[in-house]
Amino acid sequence: MPSEINIRNVEILTEKLSKAKAIYFTDYLGLNVGEITNLRRNFFLSGIEYCVTKNSLLKLAIENNDFKVSDEIFDGSTAIALSYEESITPAKVIKRFTKDHDLPLVKGILFEGDYLPKEEFQTLAEMLSRDELLAKFAMMLSSPLQKLASTLNGQMLKVIGLLNSIKDEKS
């Protein structure tokens, strides 16, 4: 018979999973308290929720949301990174953190409803975020306009120079 606390935790976890755009399943075992605290801070500053969960409760919450995932995400200790806004951000935080540490290891990813195996993590970590893509697009749009303005400005300067030389000749 499940306890009231576990039933409530499954309900909360089910709701969180249903709202998340991306869920990164990680193995954190081996990080000390200071490293975990630092990782949580990095996630928090990026707007990502990072929490440790029991595999049995996670499995029930995933079933409640009808997600299809690999059973290997339930092996060992599990912490999940939940992103409600930007799907790529958790991958970037994990990639930055693992430059100095060996952990956390990504076990799998639920990316906007689709399950991706852990091998896809590097691809996601190297993708540009939405904000980076928008900035790049804005630069691409402004570049031709700047070239046009520069070309027109150069031609105008030539016309002004020509008019000034005609004025100097006549005076």
Image (cartoon, helix red, strand yellow):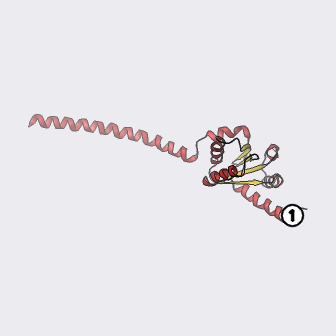
Residue behind mark 1 = 3
Most foreground residue, 105 or 36: 36
Q: Quadrant of the C terminus?
A: top left
Residue 28 placed where, x, y %? 74, 47
Q: Residue furthest bottom?
A: 4
Q: Nearer the viewer, residue 84 or 142?
A: 84
Q: How many marks?
A: 1
Q: Toward the viewer: 123 or 34?
A: 34
What residue is at 16 percent from the left and 34 percent from the top?
165
Observer able to see residue 115: no
Q: Is residue 140 left or right of residue 7?
A: left
Q: Residue at x 58, y 45 (%)?
A: 129
Q: Quadrant of the N terminus?
A: bottom right
**Mark 1, secondary structure of its residue:** loop
Q: Position of residue 53 (x, y in %)?
A: 77, 54
Image coordinates for residue 131, horizontal then vertical, percent? 55, 47
Camera-side residue: 7 or 50? 50
Residue 122 figure quarter:
top right
Left or right: residue 142 compared with residue 20: left
Residue at coordinates 81% horizontally, 54% vertically from top-left?
A: 54
Q: Is residue 47 left or right of residue 62?
A: left
Please provide percent x and percent y for residue 150. 34, 38
> Are there few (<14), some (14-19), or many (20+) residues within 10 Å of tag 1?
few
Can residue 150 be seen? yes
Q: Residue furthest right?
A: 1
Residue drawn at 79 percent across, 55 percent down: 61
Looking at the picture, which amino acid does disc 1 mark?
Ser
